[in-house]
Image: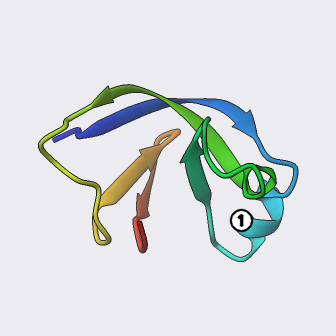
Amino acid sequence: MMIYCARITAIGLFVADGLTDKMLITFDSNGPKDCLDYSLSLEPSFREESLMILPGDRLLLAGHDYLVTAV
């Protein structure tokens, strides 16, 4: 069941550094300014308001499946 869908609007300068450490940080485009260089900025296109994204959920990104470890 899909509970959230978003479009990537910006890629921070240091996202690749996090990927080297097997970490991907995301925020909506109004995220903390001091974190945006390290994260993907997202613009939600769908969100199931009654459900929350939790550790243990799965993220499907560009056909690849990832485990959500922290929210």
Relative vertical location of residue 4 with respect to residue 25 in this rendering, above or below = above
Tell me which residue sits at (64%, 73%) in the image.
22
Question: Badge 1: few (under 14), some or many (20 or more) residues near its Cα, within 10 Å?
Answer: few
List x then y, in percent, for residue 11: 75, 41
Q: Identify the secondary structure beneath mark 1.
A: helix
List x then y, in percent, for residue 37: 81, 52
Tell me which residue sits at (78%, 57%) in the image.
34
Horizontal side of 54 relative to 36 (left or right) equals left
Q: Quarter of the image for the C terminus: give it.
A: bottom left
Horizontal side of 52 relative to 28 (left or right) equals left
Horizontal side of 7 relative to 33 (left or right) equals left
Q: Which residue is mark 1?
A: 19
Mark 1 is on which residue type? Leu
Tell me which residue sits at (74%, 67%) in the image.
18
- Name the image colouring: rainbow
Q: Quarter of the image for the N terminus: give it.
A: top left
Relative vertical location of residue 42 with respect to residue 14 in this rendering, above or below = above
Which residue is at the far right? Answer: 13
In the depicted view, which residue is nearer to us: 48 or 67?
Answer: 48
Tell me which residue sits at (77%, 56%) in the image.
15
List x then y, in percent, for residue 16: 80, 58
List x then y, in percent, for residue 48: 19, 35
Horizontal side of 6 relative to 54 (left or right) equals right
